[in-house]
Image (tube, rainbow, N blue to C red):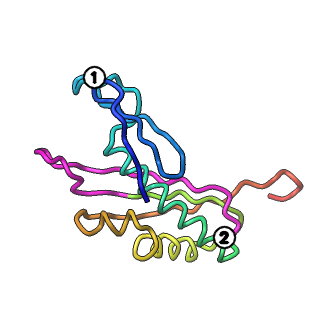
Amino acid sequence: MRVRAKWVEGVAFVGESGSGHAVVMDGAPEAGGRNLGPRPMEMVLLGLAGCTGFDVVTILRKARQAVTDCVVEVEAERAETVPRVFTRIHVHYRVRGRGLDARAVARAVQLSAEKYCSVSRMLAASVEIRHDHRVEEEAGDGAGGP
C-alpha cells in the first residue's frame, strides 16, 4: 500500500491514494492554512470511523441482519504538548435496521474493535479507545404495518 502527499501552498497538501483517489488536507488559518480540507489528524479519525464501520456492516450482513444504516461518530482528546498525539478516543455507533438483534450488533462492534479493524488495532496499541453503540429500529414502510 502506498500514498503520496503533494504540497500545494501554505500548509495544504493533496493526498493521493494508491487506489487512485485524492483528498485535500489543510490547516487552520492560525497555522498558515486556508481551511481547504480536513486536518491530517482528522483524517486518522476518519480512517478509524470508515474502517470500523465497514467491518460492522459487513459482519451484520454476513449474520443476515437487515441493517439499513450505520453512522460511526468518533471523538478524540489530544495531548496538550507536541507531539499532540491522541490520548483518548471514543467510538460511537448508531446502527439502524429492521428487527436487528442487539446481541449481533454488540458482537459486530466487539469483533471490529478487537479483531478486524486494522486502524483500531494499531491505535489501541498506544491510545485508550472506548466503544459503545445504539440500535435503532427502522421505521415501517407505510404498507399497513405499525
Give the residue at x 66% y 63%: 67
* Magenta-span inclusion, residue 132: no
- Please tell me whether the stretch drawn in magenta is mainly helix, strand or loop: strand
Boundaries of the magenta span? 65-90
Amino acid type, label 2: Arg
Residue 122, image x, y percentages: 32, 66
Quadrant of the rendered structure where residue 105 is? bottom right
Task: Check disc 2 and report its element: helix, strand or loop.
Answer: helix
Residue 61 image label: 2
- Label 1 crowd (10 A; few <14 / some 14-19 / many >=20): few
Quadrant where the N terminus sits is bottom left
Residue 142 lies, in percent from the top left, at 84, 51
Residue at the spot 78% in from the left edge and 55% down from the top edge: 140
Residue nearest the viewer, comparing 60 with 134? 60
Q: Quadrant of residue 33?
A: top left
The amino acid sitting under disc 1 is: Pro
Placement of 114 over or under 131, stated as above or below? below
Relative placement, left or right, of 140 versus 69 is: right
Q: Is residue 67 above or below residue 39?
A: below
Residue 17: x, y in percent? Answer: 47, 48
Q: Of all residues shown, which one is farthest toward the left?
A: 81
Q: Which mark is residue 29?
A: 1
Label 1 sits on a secondary structure element that is helix
Quarter of the image containing the C terminus?
bottom right
Say whether residue 89 is magenta.
Answer: yes
Examine the image and state in which quarter residue 14 appears.
top left
